[in-house]
Image: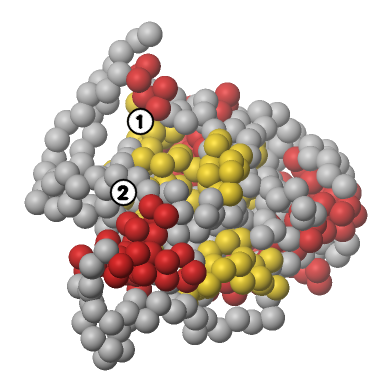
Amino acid sequence: MAVFAVVLFLFSCEQQEITVEQSNLETEATNRGGMIVLGKKLENPYSVENMKKAYDNLIVNGRSGGDIDIATTHYYVRFLPKSNEEMQVLEADSLYLFDYPLDYEIEGDGENYVDPDVNIAEGKWFYTSVPINYNFTNIKYEIIEDLFLPEEYVTNGRGSISNEFLLELEDEALRITGNYEERDDAILNGRAWENPNGHVRVFDTERNRLVGVEGVKVRTRRWFKYGNDYTDGNGFYYITKRYKRDVHYTVFFKNVSGFKVWSTVIDLSVASHHVGKHSKHGYDINIFQNSRAWRFATVNNGVVKYKAYCSQFGINHPPSNLRIAALDKASGGSATPMLRRTWGVFGFTSHSKVKAFLWKANSISISLNLVATLLKFTQPDIIIKAASSRGTATVLATTFHECAHASHWTKAGNGYWVKYINYIITYNGYGNGTGNNAGVCGIGEMWGNYFGAVCMNREFPRVGGSSAYLDEFEDWYNPGFLQDVDNIPDVSTAEIFSCLTSSTDTFDDLINQLKTKTNNDAQVDNAFANYTDWP
């Protein structure tokens, strides 16, 4: 097994160089495909009943920490949101939602948990704890148990309580319920309580090294104590919650800039990567191609990079709240239906139309009842074939291409996208360029191919520039035309993008728009004449 050096930097206190062996990292990389597997049900040490027992035991043994009223501080609860709107209500409340019950052992870490007693078309249970004054809405919920959380306890003027006693109370509750683990009281950086920190990295097959996963949420959990942080540009995270025992780590591909990555077109929640219980001091989460999470992390980085290139070239960013399905597909198509924005009166007017589009644009065949689930929960804007076998460069190229379409949508609008969608459904993809609204499709694909190639050349510069990534004569829409126009001295990439308006729906319209950006009209005509297979 080859050994290679990966130079990375920790930004917590001081910089240090880390040399790692690939074979060791691959062992650690968590090949976590499939579902979370639950083990035995645990007795809850934080229930009011067990906390009262623990308190009585301490008093009997002569311990006294003050006058404590062991009463409900929180509820252990589960919610069953039945639509995307209900899910957004819960997220707006900043709840720490888990798709598996919190009072079970986890025997196998996977990417999600599927409750065998719930039909996915009806929704999915999410588990958490909420304070007793939480304002429950009409979203279906069940209170599982009343909780007393020592760290959240407020004396309300009934006497001071020492932190040492509350810690002993928690330990005793863990002990009598069979959940006690020795505390890690080792002192590190002068502290026994620790803030978990580390890096989230993904293997870049083009650069042959680990790179940081930027802007994703890392969540820690120990029973009903939660913490989270978003990774920085190097993939570094730092949890502000402090722990004295090992914690569960999960990465959620909900980017700090607003976009979210899904694992399928019918998921009820964002893609996640559960990596099990590890040290309270922190854990480096390294994602290789043998992990399902590779495609989520690679697509996430692709979108982050694309937005940076938009800023560099003066191109509209895609909508900040994009929803992206990163599929484990090496074949079939990718697409940008902007479904959240074109469903209903704007474009897709029936479940059968959505089903037809997914098949013709993505080679995805799903039943109409699952289409209904898609429309209730996922509603993807972008669908990307992102199998790890495709490698980093190919997945990034696809991501840049599809994000370029999303930028185009911000300029052209829903009405334009309705024509685009209907063309693909009617003509089984891109057709031959002679159908109704062929210009809409041709201009869209021309732009996606060209600007995607521009971004790829910035990401992985090659001899030949953007041409190295561009099939200039592709199909009947010839994306090389935009490259030739971009080479006209007084035309910029941003000016080309500014021409992609809602009324630019034929090649003649595009040519006329481009001529308003230059004093060299003949060069625009010559660029168009360089290609002889226009429909």
In the picture shown, does residue 257 fall above or below 85?
above
Q: Taking 25 as reference, is 426 left or right?
A: right
Residue occupying the point 47% across, 71% down: 48
132 to the left or right of 117: left
Chain-order first, disc 2 or disc 1: 1
At horizontal 35% and vertical 30% (from top left) the residue drawn is: 210
Between 23 and 148, the one nearer to me in the picture: 148
Q: Is mark 2 on a helix, strand or loop?
A: loop
- Image quarter of the N terminus: top left
Q: Distance between the residues labelled 2 and 1?
A: 29 Å
Does residue 298 appear left or right of residue 225 in this picture?
right
Name the mark on residue 283.
none
One can see residue 474 in this view: no
Residue assigned mark 1? 210
Mark 2 lies on residue:
245
Residue 407: x and y in percent read: 56, 57
Which quarter of the figure is the C terminus placed in? top right
Judge by depth and name the residue closer to the eye, 534 or 246: 246
Residue 87 percent coordinates (x, y): 63, 68
- Seen as rendered, the residue at the extreme bottom is 157
Q: Which residue does the image show at 23% across and 52% down from the upper left?
A: 194
Give the number of marks: 2
Q: Position of residue 46 (x, y in %)?
A: 45, 64
| Amino acid type assigned to the residue bearing label 1 in the image | Leu
> Label 2: few (<14), some or many (≥20) within 10 Å?
some
